[in-house]
Image (spheres, rainbow, N blue to C red):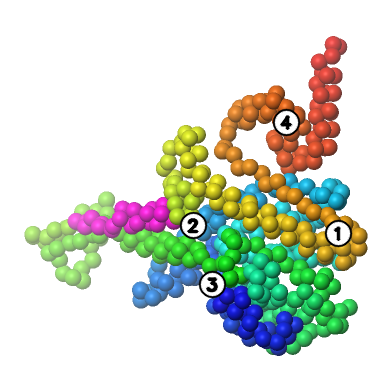
Amino acid sequence: MTARATLETSVFGLGNTSDVIRITAASRARKEQHAKRLRYYWDQSHDDAYALIARRFAKPETFRIFSVNVVRAIADKRASTYRQPPRRTFNGLDQAAGDALYRAMNADAVLKKASRYLEVCKTVMLQVGWDDDAEQPTLSVLTPNVLDVLGSNAERPERVIVSYAGDRPEDTCYHDWTATSFKRLNHRGAHKPIEGNPTGSNPYGLLPFVPWHDRLPDDEFFIPGGDDLYAAQDALNVGLANLWRAVEFQAQGQPWASGISAGEILQFGPDRVIALPQNGQFGFAAPNAPITSILAALEFVLRETAATYGVGSDLFDLSKVAESGSAKHAGRLDLKEVRQDQVAQARAMEARMFATLKAVVNTHRPGTIPDDATIGCDFAEQHDQLSEAELLENARSKVELGAWSPVDVLIALNPDGYGDRAAAFQELKRRNDESAALAAPL
């Protein structure tokens, strides 16, 4: 169902909570599909493989099930937007204060996690909240298996319902948000009182949620696509189970004998002599398992799936030799194009997230962020892997051309330790003073 159609079927206004149970129940199939995707990402596809094997074989318990996680390998490879934190520039807000807010809500780590879930589910939602105890903002990522979103504009939803499943059905609860209201409901859809907010109002005046789409949405909030990746994972899991079964059953030859009674048991071994009657025969039948054919089929699935998702058909090839720089560059062209699209979506998301952060923070700490403050994001460029000598030569050339200072070199060599320019500058001064002292005559 499209976002517009979903809105129209919710009839009497976005604040009506009596329809929460109906809305959440109607989307159960979609939520189960995305819950399955997340299970596959976290190495929990074995039960699904067992169910597929049980459809064809009478004794599925005799199969040994294991997997190669294609889903996570491809999702992590494609999710490169936040592999390195972007450089955020705040306009109208002190840079140190802005950086502190983003550090407080652990933004870079949450967004890196969200970018991977985005590859898995194609749509995620970021929620900006507030920690009363620490008096600082929070950021969390919500996936489609817990979300119901209503509104005519996929990029600006008007109502968000978040389902929180409990260990028991009666422990399940729902949070129902609009721009003006916030309600908590139990598993039956009845109101749960909110301390300090008896009227159930939304103090922020907007939804504290930021949608993030894998690509520009059409008329649906939850973007479809990607089913073939999970079908390939199923095929691979079943194929590996069949492969291992063939290895276990036919890894060694089958002994056989003729000229003896069917019930007679031969005692044989390297220290025994086998006595057979006249014209009796004994031997081992060579195994005839199609191991090579099964492996070729599995390798085909791996290569074609990787190539389809633009991560290179050699992603799962353990036998490849060292590639030249030009070969590596050609293999990354698809990923670079994917990253360009990702950065465009992420830049728009960052702007919306800052506007939401501004509303949430100023509600709890008025005047912290000026109303006219804006943000700019500079996403790190992806470079081909270089040796240490090549990195140092590139850095020296940039310094000589004036594009970098020694401070930039130190930050590039250790961005985690010296991400702050002032700290990198002081460290360079310390090292220069130390070198000068060591070079002075005794």
The residue where tag 1 is placed is 371
The residue where tag 2 is placed is 70
- Stretch in magenta: 283-305
Q: Mark 1–mark 3 contact, CB under 8 Å?
A: no
The answer to which of marks 3 and 4 sits earlier in the sequence is 3
- Asked whether 265 or 165 is in front, the reply is 165
Numbered disc in front, either 1 or 3: 1
- Residue located 49% across and 57% down the image: 70
Instruction: Tell whether position 291 is magenta.
Output: yes
Q: Is residue 263 visible?
A: yes
Residue 96's place in the image compared with 301, above or below, is above
User: Tag 3: Cα neighbours inside 10 Å, few (<14), some, or many (≥20)?
Assistant: some
**Quarter residue 435 falls in:** top right
- Residue located 58% across and 63% down the image: 122
The answer to which of marks 3 and 2 sits earlier in the sequence is 3
Numbered disc in front, either 3 or 4: 4
* Local SS, label 3: helix
Give the Cα distance between marks 1 and 2: 45 Å
For this view, does 65 lie left or right of residue 397?
left
* Local SS, label 1: loop
* Local SS, label 4: loop
Give the Cα distance between marks 3 and 4: 49 Å
| Amino acid bearing label 1 | Asp
Numbered disc in front, either 1 or 2: 1
The answer to which of marks 1 and 2 sits earlier in the sequence is 2
Residue 32's place in the image compared with 275, above or below, is below
